[in-house]
Amino acid sequence: MAAETLRVVAGVLWLLLGAMVVPALAPDEEGGPQYLAAAWVAKVNGEPISARLFQRRLVRSRSLAYRHFRQQYGAEESADFWTTSHEGMTPLGWLKQVTLDECVRIKVEQIVAREQGVVSDISYSAFLKALGRENERRQTALEAGEPIYGPKQYREDEYFTYVFTNMVIRSKRRLWDTKLHASDDTLRSYYETVKDRLYQRGDRVRIQAITIPFGRDDSDAPSRAEAEEKIDEALRKLEEGARLEDLAREYGPHGGLYERVLDEESARFDERIRPILRGEAMKLAVGETSPVFEEHRAFYIIECVERESLGHMPFEEMKHNVRNRYVDEKYEELIDELVGEAEVEVNEPVYEELRVR
């Protein structure tokens, strides 16, 4: 009986605390909750997640819920969108869980940064004080005519992203010297596993093309409609077995065959001047032809006549990049592991009262 009474009293106390906290979560001028140091929505290994941070992330992620429930259930935005249940889950409940997972990961990364000596205070109140100081510094500099870099004043979410990103970069540097350090042999082994995906030089591709320009100053150039009719005719003949080289001479300007080699050296020019042509060419195996495409007032059909692999960028040249990618990957694995092991305590009265709008 005593234990039962204690649970009831505890429940009432939680509800009273919730009633005290929730009014502080009304939107401010930036669309976020008013700050109240005592308002926490959850704790990760004893470290509080600010209700203010949670609310701002919740509001910012609304489009995720709209997209998810539209794709999964055909739900459309309406007055009761957030509270309509689909297979036992409301959009609001789903989005709160997504936001909680995101905030737990943020807090774990902050804890790691503190352990590595990157930061000393990981509370949201400390962040807000730092934001105030930074904006005050910027305002003073502007009034004195001194140069500043970046915005005149940081918005809250913008500054959080800036601070958090730099914190993670510094954490990775510290972790490289401790938990994540790897020998050259380990980095080389890692390079071998990812080189086909990340360090290929690409291929050298030689193409031949039927090209029909249109609408140019040249009096012989056809109109766009005439050029489209010609390229469609050439495509039909190609599908019937005619050789592209012969069709290029028949339909191309002045009876010429358009031929190009695309490789690593031509990439910058190609991507600036002929990005569509390069994209189509790189899809083709030897003997394959592209569909008709248009670029710079001309229609094209291209055929790959040669393709040669240029191999991989060597490890020694890419060693610094390999190390950075290795650390990025191992860091994410470490955070995944710590998130999985984290003890998460949810402040139910506050969590339940939070709303998207």
Image (tube, rainbow, N blue to C red):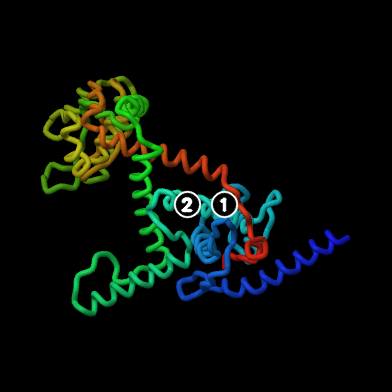
Secondary structure of residue under mark 2: helix
Left or right: residue 89 versus residue 196 is right
Instruction: Give the percent coordinates (x, y) of residue 164.
Output: 40, 56
Left or right: residue 320 versus residue 79 is left
Does the rendering let one see residue 230? no
Number of disc labels: 2
Residue on which disc 1 sits: 45
> Which residue is drawn at the image coordinates 67% and 61% (left, top)?
348
Residue on which disc 2 sits: 111
> Which residue is drawn at the image coordinates 52% and 66% (left, top)?
52
Quick one: 85 or 92, which is closer to the camera? 92
Instruction: Give the percent coordinates (x, y) of residue 340.
Output: 56, 42
Please state which amino acid type lies under the numbered disc 1.
Asn
Quick one: 308 or 111, which is closer to the camera? 111
Q: Which corner quadrant holds the N terminus?
A: bottom right
* Label 2 neighbour load within 10 Å: few <14, some 14-19, many 20+: many
Rendered image: mark on residue 83: none
Secondary structure of residue under mark 1: loop
Please identify the quarter of the rendering in which residue 299 is found: top left
Left or right: residue 349 versus residue 24 is right
Farthest-out residue, right = 1
